[in-house]
Amino acid sequence: MSLRRIPAWVWVGGVLIALFVFPLVQQSQYYQHVMVMTMMAAVLASSWNILGGYTGYTSLGHAAFFGLGGYLVALAHNYFGWHPFISSWFLGIIVMGVALILGWIALRTHGSAFVVVTIAMVFIFRIVALNLGSITHGAQGLTQPRPGWGGVPWSPELIKIPFHYIMLALLCLTVFVSWRISLSKFGLGLVAIREDEGKAEAVGIDTMLYKVLAFGISAYFVAVAGGIYSYFFTYIDPQFIFNIFTSVAMVLTALLGGRGTLWGPVLGAFIMEPLENWLVGTFGGTQIHLTVFGAILLGVMLFMPQGIIPSLRELLDRWTGSRGGGLLGREPAATEDTPSAS
Amino acid sequence: MLEESSMTNMLQVENITKTFGGILAVDGCSMAVQKGTITGLIGPNGSGKTTLFNLITGFYQPDSGQIHFDDRPIHGLLPSRICHRGIGRTFQMTRLFWKLTVLENMIVPVRQVGWRTLFSRGVKRHEEERALGFLDMVGLAGYRNEQARKLSFGQQKLLEFAAILMADPDLILLDEPAGGVNPVMIEKTMGFVDDLNRQGKTFLVVEHNMRLVMDLCQHVIVLDHGQKIGEGEPAVVQNDPIVLEAYLGTANHAGA
């Protein structure tokens, strides 16, 4: 196979150009909508992966940061008139601050206890949003003005396009940060924590600091996505945005593509999200897409438990009889669970 | 008198106690490791040697008592902080980052100070050269890009040992370096310890292989039931009736 000989930048550049011209070529609002949602799913899964993949802490609480980002942006828009395309980026930092504090508490637990604690975070945020009626309007939810700029709404035919490009920018930033982490000492420390946390602590890694930082960074992009999402739909309510299924989707997407790899979560999103839309579009409001996802997950767990990218890479290595260098070589690690940029 | 002794005592454990449930694992134990020595820590199974290691390195918090390293208290610190102070350790059951490569296992212990080095890309040349130097010493340089889990048992022990050195500790705690290792490898390990000791590293070694302890150590401390029951030069300890009793049972009973 000569796939390995194609440099990574050609792949990345090709995909980037394709995504860049997509809304210009594809004028169907439906497909434009699906693409925005797909890129958002890729952002969520990639961001989740920094904690759940590299560090090995399975969080089901990231919907809390998604919802908090959504609410802060919607509130700032309605009360102060801050445009979500700008406010999302810095209100995400506030969410990151919240995540750092919550992470400092939650990351004292491990394994399934951590999963349960993070699930609780989603419910706590939902209950707060429901009961803080004077600010959040409770179960009624929040409605934002129609998307536009400078008081002029965008025309309905072109309304998806600004969202396409801001989501693409967010996706690029998320993958870039994830890539830099995977190549850094910080990333190596995170993988060391995943492999053996006690040993990592013994050789001088401040595991709590690393884990809390990973938690905060991984909450940031999710929060920014939540902010943009709240504007995309112009309406959010607590049931809808603090939804445990949002968290579950991040996990499944990352598992499908390859947990702990750089591109796995992105690939997973580009399979799951269009598939979901197709199933819902074809079979209507039935729950059949959930059944199909269940079957896919089962298949992945049976036949490629590490996800698509690591399994394909293994196959490639077997065919070519070669492997990529280590994390420290010219090419990032080709080991199944190591974060990688190839 | 006290002043004088504490000056050369690199590690000082004072009256330390640790219980697990109702079991007294370490019972008011006091001991000291002098700078520049290779000190052996021996005792029958379950005498508290590994618990003591875990107390010194911060994996357990003592119920009472104090531990000082270079005249500064270290009890209550996190293991990573204790490592930064200059104590490195190996584990009885070798612990490595199995899916990482040999070289990556060497790089993880390199202390990162400041955000820029933490987030900058890749590994610095001098770090890699240092790692390869140590790997060369233990004969693993050729395996630098292999996953740690693919090494043989003895090689894994050597890698764990070499990786500790990357953190540049002044005191190195070895928990059964010869356990399950073939005689040639034991010989090699002893050679490394001896060389590093000459270069100024201090060692505290838990070991059941008595020949190794007697050959390598300048000073031996004997534990039984979580207490220190004897110490001194290897030859003296070897013939101490109390020590013999702890290991072999009471002489009278054995003789009868």
Image: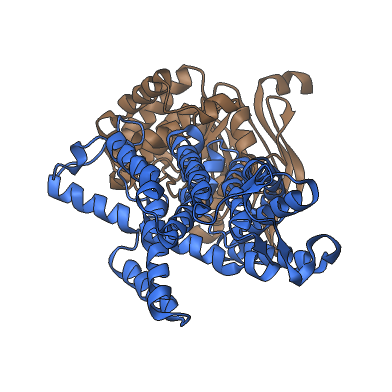
Chain colours: A blue, B brown
User: Residue at the location (72% across, 52% down)?
Assistant: A72
Q: Is residue A55 visible?
A: no
Query: Which residue ends up furthest to the bottom in the rendered image?
Result: A286
Relative to A276, B13 lies left or right: right
Residue toward you, A148 or A74: A148
Find residue A90 and report its horizontal and vertical position in percent: 67, 40
Rendered-image quadrant of the N terminus of chain B: top right
In this orientation, which residue lies closer to the viewer: A116 or B109?
A116
Q: Quadrant of residue A67?
A: bottom right
Q: Position of residue A23 (x, y in %)?
A: 41, 49
Numbered circles on residues, count = 0
Report if residue A231 is visible in the image.
yes
Q: In this view of the protein, which residue sits in the foreground, B250 or B137?
A: B137
Residue lying furthest right: A134
Q: Is residue B102 above or below residue A240?
A: above
User: Which residue occupies 42% across, 69% down?
Assistant: A276
- Horizontal and vertical percent position of residue A93: 67, 42
Quarter location, residue A212: top right
Q: Is residue A40 left or right of residue A334?
A: right
Question: Is residue A200 shown above or below A308?
Answer: above
Image check: A2 left or right of A30?
left
x then y, percent, for residue A157: 49, 55
Q: Residue at x 59, y 33 (%)?
A: B83
